[in-house]
Amino acid sequence: MLKKIAPSERAVMRYLLTFAVLSLFLPIRLETGLVLLRPFELIALLMLFFGLATGRWRRLAFSAGFLLLLPFLGWHMVSAFSVDAENGLRELLQMSAVGAFAFALAQEASRVDTHKAVNILLFGMVLILAYSITWHVAHGYLVGWKHLFDPKLAFSFVPIALAGLLIFSNRAKRRTLWLAWAGILPLLVLSGERKALLIYLFLTAALLMRGRLAAIVPAIAVGFVGLFVLATTVENSYVGKQLQTILHPLSMGQHEYLAATGKYAPGDTPSNVQRAFAFTLSRQLISEHPLVGVGTNQFKNIIDTDFSGLPGELRLGIHGEFQRVLTENGIIGLSLYVPIWLAAWFRLSRALSWALFHGLIGAAQARLLPLVLLVPCAFYVGTEASGTRAFVILSLVSLLPELTRHGLCLSLHRMRRSHPRSMRHPRFFASPLPGNTR
């Protein structure tokens, strides 16, 4: 018989889950001789202890989303041990914390109130964003708010959370959210965080076009025209340079020019040059080790050993999880990694089709949610360095169908309790977007 969960226990676990995610945005870290520790590891262990000690997980749930994670995480660790024992132990400890988080999330997927959780996440990210901007301005950085590495993550994920709320908000609340949506645009431009600006541009097009792919592409093209106009008129040289690197990505990243002259080509940035150099080297390593890769974390070791004369800003890891997996874990690793994303898309679409069939949501909401949640996350991990954040995002993506289905069922249950006589043809509690009736 299932143990009845008290509301206080539900709230504790909801806050632990959301605080674990928010802790990855905080500039709090402890360098040890073996691993890099953040509050995330402590909160993940606390979740595991709380869930097991209170008896709320008497019947363990191993959803399809959770099971899909295991083969890839297992191969990732095997690949790490193939480099050396210390590297393998380091990854084992990291994967243990990520695994504890994914396990707790899998158990709570049928219990957590996703609407409240998203509001907590958004509120926390806004506070972190405000702190980051205040810190930069106080230190004389009126633009380019990227010197705090972890808090800058909020620039990319505040738009995702805000877009998720926009999809399911009622008409009155939607006006306020659209004002907030317009208000974050100048902040993203001044931050210089290009990933965040591209995510914002895609989400704006998706929301305005109500998820219709044929209309999203022209809308994105119009957005790039707007970026071009802004890049040619903005007076700040840093902001203009960042916008130019977005508009002309193929003309940037000339690492050969840096090697020959000792300085960056006009218009280049260290980030673009590092990405171009990493891509060239990883392409060579993939051709030499296509099946199993060079080993987890071995790419950075190769750079430190064979390219020690390069500037420090170039001797970094691969900025792109799909590229890193293929380089370090080979075709086997990529064949285990990509299906997690594909399965999340199809399983989420199936859950939304079920909700659409039962009248819980409208057609535009069903079209928008996979685009709003999965595409920006894939873009982020595809352009950012690997680490705990990439694996936590992968866990959230893999379990997103379970979280969504429960969130919709929870809303239906609340409606039935509030209006038991009006549920013959139920409708999701939020007003559907205009034009999204079936």
Image: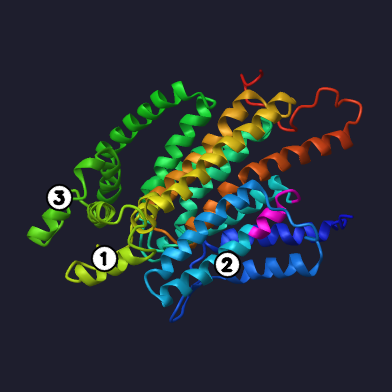
**Residue 403: which disc?**
none
- For badge 1, the amino acid type reads Arg
From the image, tell me which residue sits under label 2: 97
Q: Nearer the viewer, mark 1 or mark 2?
A: 2
From the image, tell me which residue sits under label 3: 266
User: Helix or strand or loop: what does disc 1 sit on?
Assistant: loop
**Residue 135 found in image quarter:** bottom left
Query: Residue 409 in magenta?
Result: no
- For badge 3, the amino acid type reads Pro
Taking 117 as reference, is 68 left or right? left
Specify the farthest residue to the left: 261
Q: Which residues are magenta?
A: 103-111
Name the image colouring. Answer: rainbow
Q: Tell me the distance, in whole angstroms, between the alpha carbons under discs 1 and 3.
A: 21 Å
Q: Contact, CB < 8 Å: mark 1 with mark 2?
A: no
Please, is residue 219 above or below residue 83 in the view? above
Please indicate, yes or no, whether residue 431 appears anywhere in the rendered image.
no
**The C terminus: image quadrant:** top right
